[in-house]
Amino acid sequence: MSTPPPIPTTAATKPAKHDPFAALRVANYRLYAAGFVCSSTGLQIMSTALAWEIWDRTHDAFLLGLAGLARALPVILLTLPAGTIVDKADRKRVLAITQFGFALVALSLAIASASETPLLATYLLLLLSGCVRSFNAPSRGALLPSLLPECGFENAIAWQSGFFQFAAIAGPLVAGGIIWWTGSTSLCYLVTSVACVIFAITALFLKPRPVALRKSAPGIRGLMEGAEFIWKEKTILGALVLDLLAVLFGGATALLPIYADKILHVDAVGLGALRAAPYIGALAMAGWLTMRSGFTRAGSALLWSVVGFGICMIVFGLSTSFWLSMVALAVSGALDNISVVVRHVLIQMRTPDGLRGRTTAVNSVFIECSNEVGSFESGLVAQWLSPVISATSGGVGTVLIAGFVAWMFPELRKLGRLTETPQDVVEAEEHAEPHRGLGAEGQ
């Protein structure tokens, strides 16, 4: 009689302990992250310096807003073709080229600023930077999954979100310090140029896994394959629609100068604190997300985070207390970061390698439209009615939108772990209801 095999112990079957530094233990990701932090901080420095320079030279709010449109318009127009190119090319080389492109734009801005070139040149350079941005996001988004094992991707996105929030806080502070010290913006642009060159160089040393190229349809059909995939993948579509509408109606960033001056009665320092508050909250949330093992009910987490974001906007809209407004904005940033992480992991994990550039491009268009059009919508309602009505109605609208998306996209509502596939969901439902399945077969 043979001896039965030993029964595994509890310790042997116990799930592996979560490693919050899993992504950072991968040399590929460390190299990528180092360059990403440098470039993101540099671009934040450039953005802050541009806003200061345009306002200082013109004191024209329309021209200040035109700078944002100049950056966004090329992204909206060129991102889909850029995504197709990224899916056919060497992604790390495309990323390196985009960073060299940013460096060239920043260097040109430094020369234009030092020589006091007419602002027309600045706007042309902003259009050029928008063209570069249209390739940057798809190349980064498509490249990142191939730098890590699949099990570490969610942790990497949490870290990357934290790095971005750090850059969003540090960049404006550094820019302000440089402008205060030198009295000009030229050095800010030079710092940006060097920072982007660093990312370009680190990108060239990355060693991504080989990507299985996907045969694309010719012409317009090939450009639209990413959009067609998202339309069929209802979980991703629901997440993108949720983010688009929530930011479109719920964002209050454009109203911060009005609130600081007319409602909260604070100076420029107070305005800076209000602008920083969402990023501080998002950075804290990113740190917490790296410490946890991942979402087990990602769909519910995404939907409830948007509901919470809307409530924060209602509180901010009604508040006349500076500190209450700061707390509302910080919590809104933390909840928004949950949405960012879930959406980015979901898109990359459910998209085939050969389509990642195009699906990331579609995501970029959603982001650009929601941010720029959302600012316009908030300002328009504030002008016609009042800032309070604009902020509070946007918050109420965001809560209603979350309910609408939960109803329209049950696949998103039922989403469990971000690494699961649609087939995993089907199999889980079959195991959860075995008797109903047997009954159906018997008939």
Image (spheres, rainbow, N blue to C red):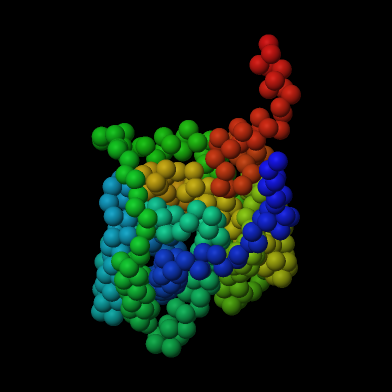
- The spot of residue 327 in percent (x, y) is 70, 66
**Residue 30 makes an appearance in the image:** yes
Q: Nearer the viewer, residue 330 or 298?
A: 298
For the residue pair 409 and 155, the one nearer the viewer reads as 155
- Marks counted in the figure total 0
Could one spot residue 317 in this view of the protein? no
Most extreme residue toward the top is 443
* The quadrant where residue 433 appears: top right
State which quarter of the image contains the C terminus. top right
Residue 33: x and y, percent? 45, 68
Apparent side of residue 9 relative to residue 165 in the rendered image (left or right): right
Question: Which residue is painted at 45% across and 65% down in the image?
Answer: 29
Q: Outermost residue toward the bottom?
A: 181
Q: Quadrant of the N terminus?
A: top right
In the rendered view, would you say 436 is above or below 34? above
Of all residues shown, which one is farthest toward the front?
Answer: 1
Which residue is rendered at x = 29% and y = 55% of the image? 90
**For residue 265, what is the image quadrant?**
bottom right
Q: State the residue in front, 51 or 306.
A: 306
Task: Classify 106 as above or below 217.
Answer: below
Q: Is residue 184 above or below residue 43?
A: below
Q: What percent of the width, then of the height, locates residue 355? A: 38, 43
Image point (61%, 47%), residue name: 417
Quadrant assignment, res 288: bottom right
Residue plotted at (32% across, 47% down): 87
Q: Nearer the viewer, residue 70 or 419?
A: 419
